[in-house]
Image (tube, helix red, strand yellow):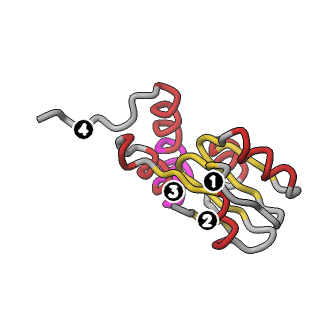
């Protein structure tokens, strides 16, 4: 039986390593939780559509997706969405609704404690 290794993408591995380091420095359970969710094997990795985010989020909220944001659905309210990756159509739809698409590194730098953010899986 093969041993589970987690992500094989070197960029994702580096991100997980940096998030764990920052979580210890800032004593942040928020960053630790995100790094744990990103450190899963590919079959268990998180993919969220914009339609799901539209139903769950409130106007002006900051949303974190520890995975990929897909472009299915519409976004009618301005949101700040942070994720590891965005599809091209998802990024366009977020920006056309006057929202922001941030990487997880940018969010961790600005808000390491995760104040007023919500993780959507």
Q: The magenta stretch spans which residues?
A: 20-32
Tell me the number on the disc at residue 27: 3
Q: Earlier in the sequence, mark 4 or mark 3?
A: 4
Q: For the residues labelled 2 and 4, say whether their Cβ atoms are less than 8 Å apart.
A: no
Tell me the number on the disc at residue 112: 1
Element at label 1: loop
Q: Nearer the viewer, mark 4 or mark 3?
A: 4
20 over 76 or under it: above or below = above
Element at label 3: loop
Tell me the number on the disc at residue 17: none
Spatial CA span between label 2 and label 1: 25 Å
Q: Quadrant of residue 89?
A: top right
Q: Earlier in the sequence, mark 2 or mark 3?
A: 3
Task: Name the spot of residue 7 as percent of width and height, x first.
Answer: 39, 35
Element at label 4: loop
Outermost residue, top direction?
10
Q: Main secondary structure of the magenta part?
A: helix
Task: Name the spot of residue 32 as percent of width and height, x first.
Answer: 47, 53
């Amino acid at each position: 039986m093969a041993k589970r290794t987690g992500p094989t993408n070197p960029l994702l591995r580096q991100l997980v390593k940096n998030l764990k380091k920052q979580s210890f420095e800032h004593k942040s359970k928020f960053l630790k939780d995100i790094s744990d969710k990103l450190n899963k094997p590919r079959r268990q990795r998180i993919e969220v559509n914009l339609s799901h985010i539209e139903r769950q989020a409130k106007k002006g909220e900051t949303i974190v997706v520890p995975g990929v944001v897909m472009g299915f659905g519409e976004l009618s309210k301005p949101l700040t969405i942070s994720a590891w990756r965005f599809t091209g159509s998802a990024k366009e739809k977020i920006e056309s609704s006057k929202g922001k698409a941030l990487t997880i590194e940018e969010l961790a730098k600005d808000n390491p404690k995760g104040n007023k953010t919500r993780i959507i899986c």
